[in-house]
Image: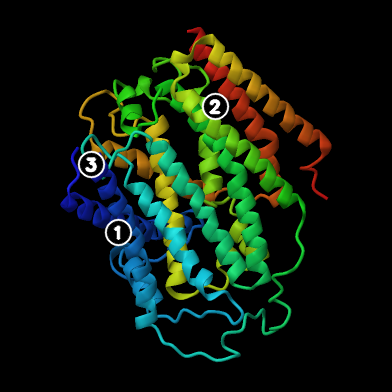
Amino acid sequence: MSLTLLNVIFAVVVAIAFAAANAAYLVWAERRGAARIQRRPGPNINGPFGLLQPPLDGIKLMAKQLIIPGGADKVLFIGAPVLAMYPAIMSFVTIPFSDSIVAHNINVGILMIFAFASTGSMSLIFAGWSSRNKYSMMSAVRAVSQSVAYEIPMLITTITVVMIAGSMDLMEIVHQQSSSILHWNIFPLLGKSHNILMPASFLIFFICTLAETNRAPFDLGEAESELVAGFHTEYGSMGFGLFFMGEYANIVIGSCMTTILFLGGWSCPFGLFPGVWWFLLKLYLLIATFIWIRWTFPRTTIYGLLNLSWKILIPLSLVNLLLTAGLIKVF
Amino acid sequence: MSTELALSAITLIGIAALVPILMAMTAFLGPRSRGKVKNEAYESGIGSIIGAVDQKFSVKFYLLAILFLIFDIETVFMFPWAVSLRELGWFGFIEMVVFMLLLLTGLIYILKKGVLNWR
């Protein structure tokens, strides 16, 4: 696919619009879902089913003052929300939604997305440190140690997929799974290497996605009952808005990656009519699962969280990787 | 190839340039009053106890950061190996198994030393 300047502008606009629209309406979906689970109505006044709530919230946030606390580091304080938002949007550039809908497919797409994803924890520590508030600082320390701990099992399980596909090209990985539902990487029977360990990889990857996006039951970074609101305690106005949008954009990215790596991307379960709608269907089903999990499970402790990663997930994913490599070599 | 690289760089720079506009808009649209008391960080009306950023936190977090560096570099080594696993033959496989077993032993040693035993 050749790139022209027109394509570039189109890609920039679509990436930002897609990320922003998704973030806005996922907040709505989350609030409605939470309300449904807790047996209350949720936002239902503004527009049909409360559908006008997100744009109104956006306007309201924009019309508020961004208070910079005295003693805060101004540059980092303003820079942190921006830094929370932009890696998520940039990752959309490489994500293939279908055979033709991709801004710029590169052959090391996985590497690029993980590179951007790990930039995200920078914004947490900037926000926590610069706002000069002990709760923010504690939260930053927690959130960074959490995202750092879960990045390793996530990368290692991704490596099992890379090993099976023999490529880091996201399009290539999807093409290898496109024959039928049984060829998807999550299913162990018919895929490229008949690997029986892929369901384990999928589970580890999914847990890590939950933790990386700071979602309950792993939302220790912004545990309201202990740390006020975590690293964005001191943020109001659009600073808070960008953190929120960044969080939801990260959820979309995580679900996109799960869809591509394990659920066959835009391929249809029966091998017919592949297309972007399959991708979106899988994507939003995964996001619904995220919301469902958030409002079902109670929050863990920070100790339990770090122990789960370092004592269980990392050894497990390493062993999983070794066995997968062995199986590929033997067969 | 080089024009493609330049154009994809422009894509990323374009996104990086557009996001701060959202932050700039709130500065134009929102009110701009300020004052010493208004800008203070506070907790339930008590101003002075909350601003302590230089408080101490558990040294374990530093250890975790160092551990992360080791394992992250390990995964960086593994990515190119994983892509070409099929072409490498048994020698390449065994080399990496030795490397990973060493790291796994390291992890077990760390756990036995009690780095992750909190309190």
User: Percent from the top left, x then y, of residue A176?
Assistant: 33, 23
User: Percent from the top left, x then y, of residue A61?
Assistant: 40, 74
Label 2 sits on what residue type? Answer: Ala
Disc nearer the start of the sequence (3/2): 3
Q: Which residue sits furthest top?
A: A331
Which label belongs to residue A101? 3
Q: Do marks 3 and 2 both belong to one polypeptide chain?
A: yes
The chain containing the residue under callout 3 comes to A
Q: CA distance from mark 3 to mark 2?
A: 30 Å
Task: Report which quarter residue A185 is drawn in.
Answer: top left
| SS at circle 1 | helix
**Vertical side of A195 occupied by A295: above or below:** below
Label 1 sits on what residue type? Answer: Gly
Q: Which residue is mark 2?
A: A200
Residue A9 in view of the camera? yes
Residue B7 located left or right of residue A192: left
Please report the residue visible at 34 percent of the width from the left and 76 percent of the height from the top: B25
Contact between marks 3 and 2 (CB within 8 A): the answer is no
Please report the residue visible at 60 percent of the width from the left and 57 percent of the height from the top: A221
Nearer the observer, A118 or B73: B73
User: Percent from the top left, x then y, of residue A230?
Assistant: 60, 64
Q: Residues within 10 Å of mark 3 (few under 14, many from 20)?
A: few
Q: Which residue is mark 1?
A: B14
Locate the N terminus of chain A by quadrant: top left
Label 3 sits on what residue type? Answer: Ile
- Label 1 vs label 3, nearer the camera: 1
| SS at circle 2 | helix
Residue A38 located left or right of residue A107: right
The chain containing the residue under callout 1 comes to B
